[in-house]
Amino acid sequence: MKETSIIPIISLTQQHHDDEQLVAEQLRHACIEHGFFYIKDHGISSTIQAAALEQTKALFALPLNEKESLSDSEMSRGYTAMQEETLDLANQSQGDTKEGFYIGREIPKDHALYNPAKLRGPNQWPNPEILPRFRPVMDEYYKELCNLGFRMVQLLALSLHLPSKHFFDDAFRDDPVATLRLLHYDGSIPSDPDGGIFGCGAHSDYGMITILLTDDKPGLQILSKTQQWIDVPPVPDCFVVNLGDMLERWTNGLYQSTVHRVLTLPVAADADDEAVGDRYSIPFFYDPTFDTLVECLSTCCDENANPPKYKPITSGQHLIDKYRTTHADFVPS
């Protein structure tokens, strides 16, 4: 655990005009060296964080048949079953020992923007008579995280020495591909790396940035540059932020999309309730609008000394290509 000090904690507090650039430079260092960092003073209340985790637990406590009825594989919304996802095909002997639930921007089928091919559509909501607080809490938390995500991409623009902090605004302001994913790791199935059993197999995230809320259970690990697995424990009042493959692609590899995994720790032999080992977390994936072209930023490449390493691709195509490789039930339009 002592090695966790390599993961910086960055305060988003800004009292003076120059503070924003200072925060941006701290982000730049963290993005180049680690691809992971904590943020504090982020403006998201502990009350809504606790409520989101509470409702996550309530959702996964529903009977399996009720959860399975809340699945939309075409939109990649709603429920994903235990072991449905396999993130490390080379090293896993079975799927991840977790179940999940996707929530995106709510777009009714009669809305002009409805388009499943671009991941625009309605969510799957549990019966409000059974979970009356679930949708109001998740709607509020989703809105708060969208605002925080927008703030983070502006800081990232500054950190990349782009012409303005508003460089990415058009790609995120109106129609970002922004997704909450509620996760429940089964505490009755401890991870066994040698046996290929993981709460979440080793992988890098697909998109721009991920903002992670966790309960108080450890288990998250990142792969350091020296190829050592390093613990990233929960820190009170902090979110964990990590960069995805899309941002690494946009920055020509300058910013790191770091491989990470989750180990479900064994329950103590004298524990009264097997569920005490269960772990809950809520990653928020914040990505640009579906048709955004992702190509090397001018501040991250040079045709002679550092030419672009990746071909241009749209954000949406990049995400769909990734979903196909890891989700057994994903059936895009």
Image (tube, rainbow, N blue to C red):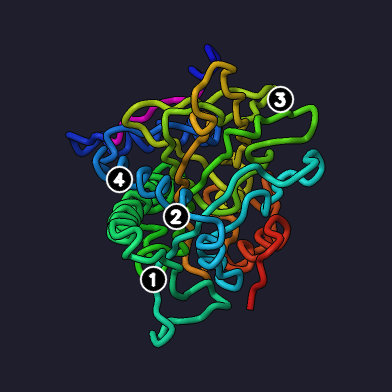
Residue located farthest toward the top when viewing the structure as drawn: 2
Marks 3, 2: nearer the viewer:
2
Disc ID at residue 51: 4
Label 2 sits on residue: 180
Q: Position of residue 43 (x, y in %)?
A: 24, 41
Q: Amino acid at mark 1?
A: Glu
Task: Identify the mark nearer the N-term, 3 or 4.
Answer: 4
Disc ID at residue 106: 1
Circles 1 and 3: CB atoms closer than 8 Å: no
- SS under mark 3: loop
Task: Identify the mark nearer the N-term, 2 or 1.
Answer: 1
Give the Cα separation between the discs numbered 2 and 1.
12 Å
Circles 2 and 1: CB atoms closer than 8 Å: no
Give the Cα separation between the discs numbered 3 and 2.
29 Å
> Which stretch did the figure color magenta?
7-12
Q: Amino acid at mark 3?
A: Gln
Residue plotted at (45% across, 61% down):
103
Describe residue 91's horizontal placement relative to residue 70 as left or right.
right
Residue placed most toward the observer, 127 or 158: 127
Give the Cα separation between the discs numbered 1 and 3.
40 Å
Residue placed most toward the observer, 296 or 177: 177
Residue plotted at (52% across, 44% down):
184
Task: Identify the mark nearer the N-term, 4 or 2.
Answer: 4
- SS under mark 4: helix
Residue plotted at (70% across, 55% down):
326
Task: Identify the mark nearer the N-term, 3 or 2.
Answer: 2
Q: Position of residue 110 (x, y in %)?
A: 40, 87
In magenta stretch: residue 95: no
Task: Identify the mark nearer the N-term, 1 or 4.
Answer: 4
Label 3 sits on residue: 227
